[in-house]
Amino acid sequence: MALDGGDRIVVPATALAQVLRNPAKQVRLWRLVQHDKTDVVPLDGFHAQAVGLLLAKSGTPDIADAHVVICAQRAGHAVITSDPFDLRRLDPGLRVIPA
């Protein structure tokens, strides 16, 4: 796991908000978010502009998915997800690790 190697984990705040709707279904991510090597990235003005442009370009509506893609692109990270199809619609070249 990335945390074992000293890597930092990035979690977009929008993804965290989705987890908080039903944390019982997302126990692993909830635990990860609470780890001291995890950075939660806010949806600030800079990210909001990039998310909006990506949604317009892709014709998709999911702000959280787009925020995940923007954060991964900016950090040069792969994304661990249970739903790679939606993320690849936003960025076909995105490195995705199925969960």
Image (cartoon, rainbow, N blue to C red):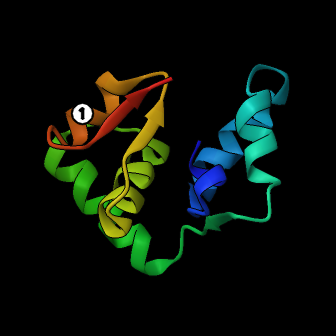
In what quadrant of the picture does the N terminus appear?
top right
- Say which of 95 and 85 sits in front: 95
Work out whether 29 lies above or below 25. Answer: below
Q: Is residue 89 left or right of residue 20?
A: left
Identify the element where label 1 is drawn. helix
The residue at the point 82 percent across, 30 percent down is: 23
The residue at the point 58 percent across, 56 percent down is: 5
Q: Is residue 81 left or right of residue 86?
A: right
Q: Amino acid at mark 1?
A: Arg
Q: Position of residue 39 (x, y in %)?
A: 65, 66
Q: Position of residue 29 (x, y in %)?
A: 70, 38
Work out whether 28 lies above or below 6. Answer: above
The residue at the point 23 percent across, 41 percent down is: 90
Work out whether 14 lies above or below 20. Answer: below
- Res 52 → quadrant: bottom left
Q: Which residue is mark 1?
A: 88
Residue farthest to the bottom, as pictured: 46
Work out whether 44 lies above or below 33. Answer: below
- Say which of 27 and 23 sits in front: 27
Q: Is residue 79 left or right of residue 50?
A: right
Q: Position of residue 42 (x, y in %)?
A: 60, 69
Query: How many C-alpha atoms fall within 10 Å of the one at disc 1: few (<14), some, or many (≥20)?
Result: some
The residue at the point 33 percent across, 35 percent down is: 96
- Res 25 → quadrant: top right
Q: Position of residue 38 (x, y in %)?
A: 68, 61
